[in-house]
Image (cartoon, helix red, strand yellow):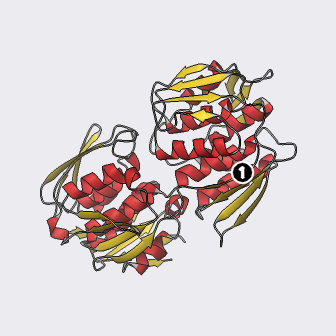
């Protein structure tokens, strides 16, 4: 699929089921490297990022079997595992750096190119390396590679993160599972995906306590075993469909969700004039009319604050609000790359530092636009659904990184989309 053609659509209505969380499945697949035994992971979304992680695991020597019909992946790293990953794979996905914690814990060495991913900000790996160094690892960076060595094994340590980084928290957690003694991570991330990873690590025999709070304690164990684990629902996919209901003046029931994970998104949608209720199946979101969207002030923050991964979708919604909205991005410095594309569609947005000031307009207009990253692509799709005329979106491969069956799900809700 090279591009996506989007036509103005009627209000979206129906039921949509959310898949497993992209931001959970990637670290959990990496964590399977910690054990020689079989790990079976359920509710794995069919995403290009998950496919890249599978390729990396295969390159390292792990055996994988992905049954896409049953949405499960079996991983067994039972033989000699390599300690280096190729640039051509790592450069495609930021989360590839998550293999370093498991490799360091199991083999005492990891060598990996500096990772790639969406161009939404620097996202330095220094916090990861700081944690490894505190546990006794030696680190060398040269020629675009990072080599991390702990010949005598890792030793538990007390680690304070300068910022509650999700990736650093996950990598240090995984490394600490086989370290000698206790590791304490302070000011760590508290996202639901952190809890999901901790549950998996405990299922394979780890001793991780406090996940979901700002202090996690990991008592190292001698070895880990295989286990079965089901990935939590993707709260960002759920939030994207919730915004789709509000933006189009529709009525969508989103199934397979965890209400608590969506509280900041739900609160802002209600503030914008949408109605949200819990049902036996999940969440129902509806909006009386597109013209009833109220302006908002939105500020992204680490969980449990408003998620940066929902910022661009909400900005698409606020382009048609009645009044002035302000969106402030505090997590990633380059996450306003979609603004120029929304302006091509007639949006009235002004950037001032890390804030975007949005003056609502009565209508958007179809245009040729480009997805600069995963969530920007989703925002532009949603905007195209309410724009007059035809919107042509390119670089749509970003969508395949984080949304499973996105176009098909939108089409079943009444969206007019065509992939070319």
Q: Residue reaching furthest front?
A: 280
How busy is the neighbourhood of tag 1: few (under 14 within 10 Å), some, or many (20 plus)? some
Horizontal side, residue 1 vs residue 287: left or right: right
Residue 49 location (% of width, % of height): 60, 56
Q: Residue reaching furthest left?
A: 323
Nearer-the-camera pick, 196 or 380: 196
Residue 187 location (% of width, % of height): 46, 27
The secondary element bearing badge 1 is classed as: strand
> Residue 329 lies in what quarter of the image?
top left
Nearer-the-camera pick, 50 or 369: 50
Task: Please report the residue visible at 16 percent of the width from the left and 62 percent of the height from the top.
Answer: 361
Is residue 417 depicted above or below 55 in this figure? below
Is residue 368 depicted above or below 106 in this figure? below
Horizontal side, residue 346 vs residue 95: left or right: left
> Looking at the image, can residue 40 be seen?
yes
Nearer-the-camera pick, 128 or 116: 128
Task: Please report the residue visible at 27 percent of the width from the left and 66 percent of the height from the top.
Answer: 247
> Looking at the image, can residue 338 be seen?
no
> Residue 50 lies in what quarter of the image?
bottom right
Q: Kindly identify which residue carries mark 1.
A: 227
Residue 190 location (% of width, % of height): 46, 38
């Amino acid at each position: 699929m090279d591009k996506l053609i989007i036509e103005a659509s009627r209000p979206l209505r129906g039921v949509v089921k959310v898949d497993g969380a992209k931001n959970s499945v990637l670290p959990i697949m990496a964590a399977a490297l910690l054990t020689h035994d079989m790990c079976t992971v359920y509710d794995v979304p069919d995403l290009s990022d998950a496919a890249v992680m599978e390729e990396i695991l295969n390159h390292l020597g792990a055996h994988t079997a992905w049954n896409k019909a049953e949405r499960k992946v079996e991983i067994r790293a039972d033989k000699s595992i390599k300690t280096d990953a190729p640039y051509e794979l790592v450069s495609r996905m930021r989360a590839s750096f998550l293999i370093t914690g498991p490799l360091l814990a199991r083999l005492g060495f990891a060598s990996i190119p500096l990772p790639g991913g969406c161009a939404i900000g620097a996202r330095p790996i220094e916090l990861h390396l700081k944690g490894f160094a505190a546990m006794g690892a030696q680190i060398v960076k040269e020629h675009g590679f990072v080599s991390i060595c702990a010949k005598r094994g890792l030793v538990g340590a007390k680690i304070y993160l300068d910022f509650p980084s999700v990736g650093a928290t996950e990598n240090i957690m995984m490394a600490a599972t086989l370290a000698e003694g206790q590791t304490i991570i302070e000011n760590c991330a508290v996202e639901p995906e952190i809890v999901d990873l901790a549950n998996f690590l405990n299922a394979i025999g780890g001793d991780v306590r406090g996940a979901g709070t700002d202090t996690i304690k990991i008592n190292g164990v001698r070895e880990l075993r295989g286990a079965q684990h089901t990935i939590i629902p993707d709260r960002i996919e759920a939030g994207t469909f919730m915004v789709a209901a509000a933006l189009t003046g529709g009525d969508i029931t989103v199934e397979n969700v965890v209400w608590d994970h969506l509280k900041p998104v739900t609160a802002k949608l209600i503030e914008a004039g949408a109605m949200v209720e819990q049902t036996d199946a999940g969440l129902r979101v509806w909006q009386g009319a597109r013209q009833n969207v109220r302006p908002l002030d939105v500020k992204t923050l680490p969980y449990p604050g408003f998620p940066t991964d929902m910022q661009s979708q909400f900005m698409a919604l606020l382009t048609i609000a009645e009044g002035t909205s302000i969106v402030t991005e505090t997590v990633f410095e380059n996450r306003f790359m979609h603004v120029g594309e929304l302006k091509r569609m007639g949006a009235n947005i002004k950037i001032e530092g890390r804030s975007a000031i949005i003056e609502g307009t009565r209508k958007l207009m179809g245009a040729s636009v480009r997805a600069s990253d995963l969530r920007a692509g989703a925002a532009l799709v949603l905007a195209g659904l309410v724009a007059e005329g035809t919107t042509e979106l390119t670089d749509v491969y970003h969508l395949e990184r984080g949304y499973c069956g996105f176009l098909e799900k939108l089409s079943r809700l009444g969206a007019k989309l065509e992939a070319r």
